[in-house]
């Protein structure tokens, strides 16, 4: 899956919390959101402060649901419930555990969440 395909899939499955997402789909989405946020920070620093902040806020609001959805599908690919994302509320240990799970390869073949994407 290419970078553009991953972004397209994530926006087309805007609020789809079922199914599975392979590692490239998830990590290309993360890369897209991080780079876009950095661009808005640069705009905020170099230009009118309100414009950069407003663009960043709109972008974050537009991408929060697909971000949660693709993370849930990624966890499904490793045969875990998307509810495990709540580990983000446990500092450090929860973050590390979730990062390890998001980096793991998906289960081969079908699992309880469906067949591989």
Image: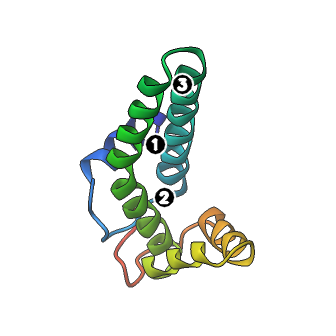
Q: Residues within 10 Å of mark 3 (few under 14, many from 20)?
A: some
Q: Earlier in the sequence, mark 3 or mark 2?
A: 2
Image label count = 3
Q: Describe residue 117's horizontal placement relative to residue 2 as left or right.
A: left
Q: Do the residues bearing badges 1 and 2 touch, measured as CB atoms within 8 Å?
A: yes
Depth check, mark 3 against mark 2: the one in front is 3
Q: Which mark is residue 44?
A: 3
Residue 5: image quadrant is top left
Give the residue furthest to the top.
47
Q: Residue at x 27, y 53 (%)?
A: 14
Q: Which mark is residue 78?
A: none
Percent position of residue 62, x then y: 32, 45
Residue 102: image quadrant is bottom right
Q: Residue at x 48, y 35 (%)?
A: 3
Percent position of residue 30, x then y: 53, 47
Quarter the C terminus occupies: bottom left
**Of helix, strand and loop, which one carries label 2?**
loop
Circle 1 residue? 1
Q: Residues within 10 Å of mark 1 (few under 14, many from 20)?
A: few
Relative to the observer, which residue lies in front, 112 or 36?
36
Circle 2 residue? 22
**Of helix, strand and loop, which one carries label 1?**
loop
Q: Residue at x 47, y 70 (%)?
A: 77
Q: Earlier in the sequence, mark 3 or mark 1?
A: 1
Q: Earlier in the sequence, mark 1 or mark 2?
A: 1
Depth check, mark 3 against mark 1: the one in front is 3
Q: Describe residue 34's horizontal placement relative to residue 99 as left or right.
A: left
Instruction: Please tell me whether residue 25 is drawn above or below residue 16 in the rendered image.
Output: above
**Of helix, strand and loop, which one carries label 3?**
helix
**Marks 3/1: CA–CA distance:** 32 Å
């Amino acid at each position: 899956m290419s970078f553009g395909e991953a972004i397209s899939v994530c926006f087309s499955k805007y609020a789809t919390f079922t199914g599975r997402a392979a590692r490239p789909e998830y990590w290309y989405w993360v890369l897209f959101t991080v780079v876009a946020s950095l661009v808005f920070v640069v705009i905020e620093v170099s230009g009118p402060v309100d414009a950069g902040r407003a663009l960043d806020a709109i972008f974050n609001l537009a991408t929060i649901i697909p971000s949660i959805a693709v993370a849930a599908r990624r966890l499904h690919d490793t045969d875990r419930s998307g509810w495990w994302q709540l580990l983000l509320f446990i500092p450090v240990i929860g973050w590390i555990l979730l990062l390890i799970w998001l980096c793991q390869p998906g289960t081969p073949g079908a699992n309880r969440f469906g067949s591989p994407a």
